[in-house]
Amino acid sequence: MLRGGARLVAGMDEVGRGSLAGPVSVGVVVVDLTTRTAPVGVADSKLLSPGAREALVPALSRWGRARAVGHASAAEIDAVGILAALRLAGQRALAVAEGQIGPVDAVLLDGSYDWLTPPADLFAPDGQVHRQVNLLVKADRTCASVAAASVLAKCERDSLMVALADEYPQYGWAANKGYASVDHVAALAEHGPCRLHRRSWKLPGLVSASAAPAAPAVDPTGPWGMMGG
């Protein structure tokens, strides 16, 4: 895309889509033709150990023209669905990055579905056409900016879940980060869901999804309701 004339390209990737609790998070790293080679070891976050990911964060925090991580809370996922929540998180991340360097010309998303562009909305509120969105399956394994975005998003989301482990120790989030591990499912069966579970989902360990308490109203100022940086 840069060789095709784009001035600023944002690589984006999401983490936490399949988690039972906590936010969905989207990382973005913006590069241009002057951006140097990515730090050694940058790869899809799923292919790196937790220690290897954390070791990359200092270098990645300086690499590229801008970088950010945006989040959408469990309450927002319940209110609007996972795809719209991904869009919220991605738009929040882009807002931070573009606030630093101005509008990007193009976005590269990992995968085969454009969850960033609002449906049936070809024009932004100010009348400007939305930025070009390009899709590439396994972009997190072939594009350094997308891989870097994946690592930053994974590390920030993991740290949020670890920070909440003391408040909700029964779910084992320090280890499972909100995903459906054996201990997490067992805790759901014993204790039921808390306010940070995605209660609109069929949570394993519960008798039925309808047995879970109703999702709270979306609070944009609550946990992960606003953008991260």
Image: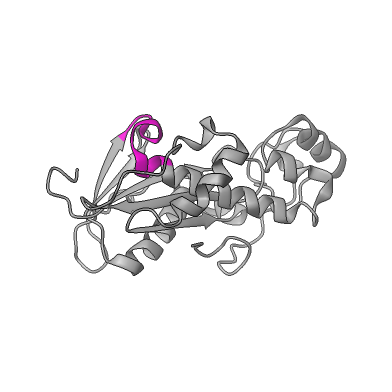
As displayed, is residue 77 above or below residue 123?
Answer: above
On the image, the x and y values in percent for residue 34 come to 22, 53
Which of the 4 quarters of the picture holds residue 184? top right
Q: Specify the farthest residue to the right.
A: 190
Check residue 66 for magenta coloring.
no
**Residue 130 seen in the figure:** yes
On the image, the x and y values in percent for residue 93 come to 42, 58
As displayed, is residue 86 above or below residue 167?
Answer: above
Which residue corresponds to the image point at 26% horizontal and 41% vertical from the top-left?
134
Q: Nearer the viewer, residue 21 or 119?
A: 21
Which residue corresponds to the image point at 80% horizontal and 55% vertical from the top-left?
166
- Count of number-bearing discs: 0
**Residue 195 seen in the figure:** no
In the picture provided, is 179 more to the left or to the right than 188? left
On the image, the x and y values in percent for residue 74 come to 61, 52
User: In the rendered image, which quarter contains the N terminus?
Assistant: top left
In the picture provided, is 22 more to the left or to the right than 4? right
Magenta residues (range): 136-147
Q: Main secondary structure of the magenta part?
A: helix
In the picture provided, is 203 more to the left or to the right than 172? left
On the image, the x and y values in percent for residue 150 come to 46, 43
Which residue corresponds to the image point at 76% horizontal and 42% vertical from the top-left?
211
Which residue corresponds to the image point at 52% horizontal and 56% vertical from the top-left?
71
As displayed, is residue 194 above or below residue 179?
Answer: below
Which colour assignment does the render follow?
Answer: one colour
